[in-house]
Amino acid sequence: MASYFIRIHAKINHVLRQIKQILLSVFCASSKGTAETKATETPSDEIFLAPVKIDGKWGYINKAGKIVIKPQFEDARWFQEGLARIKLGGRWGYIDKTGKIVISPQFDGAGDFQEGLATIELGWKCGFIDKTGNIVIKPQFEDAWNFKEGLAMIVFNERYGFIDKTGNIVIKPQFEDAGRFQEGLAAIKLGEKWGFIDKNRNIIIKPQFDSAGDFEEGLANIELGEKWGYIDKSGNIAIKPQFEDAEDFKEGLTRISLGGKYGYIDKNGNIAIEPQFEKTGDFQEGLARIKLGNKYGYIDKNGNIAIEPQFEGAWLFQEGLAPIQLGGKWGYIDKNGKMAIKPQFDWGSEFS
């Protein structure tokens, strides 16, 4: 009977991982082969491409708006460390920036490359491959996340732990939940409370919080009594729990929620931009997306409207451009709000 429930749990985890992949990019599955491409530029990490969806298929454009990798994939994601994951025939593989398939679609699921390795899923088990497509850590885990700071979080027997790049378990699976290592510490859940450990398995901040996020710019968001605040790396309360929601710090500011509206605070806990928006995003390249009157625009770090709310959808600025939606189609604007690539795509994502 126990083995039956373990199998059921594994199936549930499989479905949840599939849902997670869809939600992470809100992206939307032909056979193995070489991808068609119109690219003429010299391959380089300095060539920035963005995945776009046209007539149900995914391809890539450059910053001039030119299609350089023909839409042909069932799904496509950002380039990370020179490769992007794509889906063909219901399987995931990887292409380079010329559109060449360098790792044939063969995996049930796949993650982005980080620190030279990428998570893959085969037969409901997760492992890791290198950039040649070789399996370097065999699929054996119920779930796995990308490497960060030399360690990857994994789930084994319904408990969270960490492995190194050889696949050795360095922190045994023992936690009810966990976060990835960030700035030397990782959030862990024990006995329904959250704390933090270091890479030597030491509990640095004892489990005491109702929830916890990653450290970013020296602070981590934590929840106590249904209110969110921030701690420093010693576990001291740096900003007292008082917010309905709180995110990670980016570029010196973080978004918070008060009275059902979103604004921003600085690292001293001072309100830097009054809560007034229906939705907000992280600051990136000096601007953050906001939602007002059911339309999206952008503000600067002083809270000034830099680009008037006018879009049906909007994402972060990356490499000087941001995807926006107008009239049901996606295009790209520059930091002055000028249309750089006219809305024409069924979906568009950031450049990388």
Image (cartoon, rainbow, N blue to C red):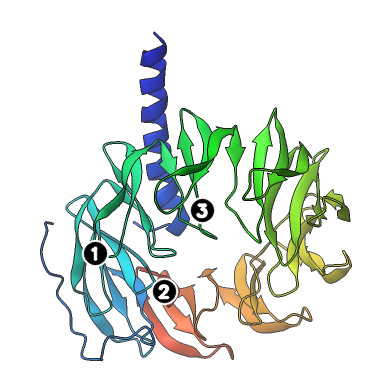
Q: Which of marks 1 and 2 is in front?
A: 1
Tell me where residue 118 appears, x and y as whole percent.
37, 57
Q: Please tell me which residue is depicted at 44% across the width and 47% down the height of the picture.
A: 20
Residue 245 visible, this angle: no
Nearer to us: label 3 or label 2 = 3
Between the C-alphas of marks 3 and 2, the distance is 37 Å
Could you tell me the amino acid type at mark 2? Answer: Trp
User: Who's the residue at 26% across and 82% down the image?
Assistant: 67
Q: Which residue lies furthest to the top in this view?
A: 1
Q: Label 2, on which residue?
A: 330
Residue 47 picture location, percent across and down: 36, 86
- Report the front residue among 150 and 124: 150
Q: Can residue 10 be seen in this view?
A: yes
Q: Nearer the viewer, residue 160 or 328?
A: 160
Q: Earlier in the sequence, mark 3 or mark 2?
A: 3
Q: Name the residue under label 3.
A: 151
Q: In which quarter of the image is the C terminus?
A: bottom left
Q: Secondary structure beneath disc 1? A: loop
Q: Are marks 3 and 2 in contact (CB under 8 Å)?
A: no
**In the shown orientation, is residue 212 left or right of residue 11?**
right
